[in-house]
Image (cartoon, grey):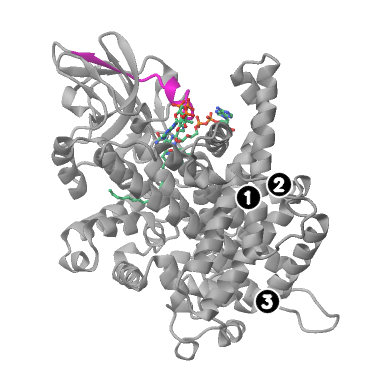
Amino acid sequence: MAPPTSSRYCVPDLRKERKNCSFNQEEITNLLDGGPEQTDFRRKLEDYFLKDPEFLDPIPPEYLSHEDRYANELRKACYMIRKFNEDEEVQQVVGEMEGIRRLIGSGLGVALTKDGNPLALHYVMFLPSIMGQGTIDQQAEWMGRAWAGEIIGTYAQTELGHGTFLRGLETTATYDPSTQEFILNSPSITAAKWWPGGLGKTANYAVVMAQLYTKDVCRGIHPFIVQLRDEDTHQSMPGVIVGEIGPRLGMNTNDNGFLLFKNYRIPRKNMLMKYSQVLEDGTYVKPPNEKLAYGTMVFVRVAICFDAYRQLQRAVTIATRYAAVRHQSELVPGAPEPQILDYQTQQYKLIPQIATIFAIHFASQHVWDTYQQLTGELHEGSVELLPEVHALSCGLKALSSNDAGFGVEICRLACGGHGYLASSNLPRIYTSTTAAITYEGENTVMWLQVARYLVKSFREASQGQPLHKSVSYLVAQPASTHAKKDLSNRGLVEAYKSAVSSMVAENAGRLQQYCDKGEKFEHAWNNCSVLLTQCAEAHIRFFTCDMFVHNVETLELSDGVRSILRRLCRLYMIYHITLNQGLFLRNGALAASDISILEGELSVLLASLRPDAVNLVDAFDVHDRVLDSTLGNWDGNVYERMYEEAMKSPLNKTDVPQAYYKYLRPLMKSNL
Ligand SMILES: CCCCCCCCCCCCCCCCCCCCCC(=O)SCCNC(=O)CCNC(=O)[C@H](O)C(C)(C)COP(=O)(O)OP(=O)(O)OC[C@H]1O[C@@H](n2cnc3c(N)ncnc32)[C@H](O)[C@@H]1OP(=O)(O)O
Ligand SMILES: Cc1cc2nc3c(=O)[nH]c(=O)nc-3n(C[C@H](O)[C@H](O)[C@H](O)COP(=O)(O)OP(=O)(O)OC[C@H]3O[C@@H](n4cnc5c(N)ncnc54)[C@H](O)[C@@H]3O)c2cc1C
């Protein structure tokens, strides 16, 4: 929490904003952290790591070469882990697993390794794969060394030819019972693994997803632990071809890599065998559900939802503080230039982003709890919850990465020209956030998975079968177009429910009509797929609204916090309803007159939330170093900081650069 304004300098504009806060900021901070002890834990962790000079970047990374940038982030990432493993003080501050999760997956981790942590995939996917897919014996064999950082791994699944269509992966792992080994091969250039983070130069191991062949039968894709580099020399193993794929839009220090195998042998015990097994003689033992091999992706999709709103938190904190400091144009002719935050259009850009953070937070928390329940039930052998968790994690991953990606871009635009500067940090926040729209399942593909679940559930409901919780509303009766509408928060959730269930019913019907006309189901599906993705998005939007209202009404909150969250929740719903009014109008869930009332209320809500906009982003409690922005610091000292940062440009080392003498001068003087 930032200290009281009296004890810390901030510019007068921000001092004015902070003077009257209508709610208890610490309560919001605790709510988003998961409780006061979690806030305390996060702050201790931040204090501990951020005070360490090793994590400072005397030269902004943008001025470094590709290699130096990678080396610099690797230096910090390794130092971070060493400190974590060796330092007694840090071990007292952080619990093992939780500490690493916070270090890698939080704003703090992002602040320490700015442009992509080369060790991220080791923690985010390699370790979770061993834990989720390995037997107890395999965990015992690999986890200790991996935790200690003695071996570093990644998750190598995507290939040049296929990322989305996993059944189309080409890498093969053929079992040889005579030696009890798997032989790995990349049969073509399109079989090259392509994209895995940390694969290029950092990792010496990987969990490789490959088509398993035993007894001449292909058994589908399975995970294998594969050594890629010699543990002493770090040179690639014979039969392994590995390297980096070159610069990306962002996350350039993640050393995303490529990988090919040529008759490369690994022992039988290196297949992760928690769910399916290959016995010594090559007999294949099937898993209880073949999609359990995709388990690591489900875990990471849920983690991405939390990451998405934390990225948006950074962007909206920067843009809102800047909007309070920045003065531009005239609202009233001749009057002083207002803070740009006073323009309603600016409020419309920023305040819905603030609301989105809470919406994604509550929804992610629910999906995480359901995921944990599934994990517990899997231990008991039940896969009953798997389809529900798969659909929710795909859907919320798509919605959160989409909202956060576009939300960050709106924040950048809201800062005018200065938002385009690297020193605002908005470009870097954008490039990392937008990557999540693609990785861990491209969003359109994720929506189609959700749509598949919706259509299937709708059909089951029509046959009177029980539905999982998140889709149980699909049996709802259509709204009566004549009844007077309840426009309370709960009433709007009901309107959502009715509109989405009609939409799903209509498109399930459309799909059926295509099939009835003799089209094959797959073609009928493709013909309806634009509308089906819209159904999926509307369903998950409804889910986030439902979760938002449920939490605001049922959590134990002080009056001030409940009041501000209620208004944010209402703004969130009205924002999306007015953007998608056709959805509500066409089945009569809302009437045109209702929409008109809501549009009017949107303006009232923006005005009512405007005075607390800075207080709200302050309550996110994002450390200045985590923001890492000239525009967003707590003190609001924007212009001096921008000037200082500009002075770091190597071009400013001299008044006249060498390039002038080499190129410009000869041109300018050529006529002399
Ligand atoms: C321990 C330490 C703790 C530390 C932890 C620290 C945590 C900190 C966290 C930090 C935060 C982040 C930081 C960022 C860092 C950067 C990370 C960058 C990472 C980026 C990595 C990647 O990017 S890595 C590659 C991801 N690459 C995909 O994501 C492929 C998508 N492609 C598919 O995923 C499949 O291809 C696709 C489409 C499903 C079709 O799969 P398919 O063809 O086999 O299946 P069909 O469509 O035919 O479906 C047949 C039936 O299977 C059902 N089903 C399908 N999947 C299922 C499933 N998973 N579970 C259950 N059921 C499933 C389906 O619902 C159908 O069910 P039904 O028949 O009943 O309708
Ligand atoms: C920054 C970053 C980090 C990554 N890290 C890793 C990693 O660590 N490990 C790893 O294994 N992979 C990683 N990936 C790869 C990533 O998971 C894939 O890029 C992603 O799953 C999308 O697959 P693709 O690239 O094959 O896209 P494609 O599937 O080729 O998508 C291209 C277009 O085709 C459309 N499309 C594809 N299939 C369908 C369909 N069935 N129906 C309708 N439209 C469809 C998509 O919607 C999209 O518009 C990473 C990618 C990025 C960008």
- Which tag is nearer the camera, tag 2 or tag 3? 3
Q: Earlier in the sequence, mark 1 or mark 2?
A: 1
**Label 3: which residue?**
608
Q: Earlier in the sequence, mark 2 or mark 3?
A: 3
Q: Write down the quadrant of residue 206 in the picture.
A: top left
Residue at image position (68%, 76%) is 608
* Position of the N terminus by quadrant: bottom left
Residue 614 relative to residue 77: left or right: right
From mark 1 to mark 2, how far is it between C-alphas?
Answer: 73 Å
The disc label shown at residue 670, or none: 2
Q: Amino acid at mark 1?
A: Lys
Span shown in magenta: 161-176
Magenta-drawn stretch contains 523: no
User: Circle 3 sits in a helix, a strand or a loop, which is it?
Assistant: helix
From mark 2 to mark 3, how far is it between C-alphas?
Answer: 64 Å
Residue 139, above or below 188: below
Camera-side residue: 388 or 61?
388
Camera-side residue: 71 or 85?
85
**Label 1: which residue?**
497
User: Circle 1 sits in a helix, a strand or a loop, which is it?
Assistant: helix
Residue 314, above or below 142: below
Residue 225 relative to residue 125: left or right: left
Pointer 3 residue Cβ closer than 8 Å to ligand 1: no
Camera-side residue: 363 or 611?
363
Extreme-bottom residue of the structure: 6
Residue 316, above or below 529: below
Residue 173 position within the rendered picture, expressed as x and y whole percent measured from the top left = 28, 19
Disc 3 packing (10 Å; few <14; some 14–19; many ≥20): few
- Res 405 seen here: no
Magenta-drawn stretch contains 169: yes
- Which tag is nearer the camera, tag 1 or tag 2? 1
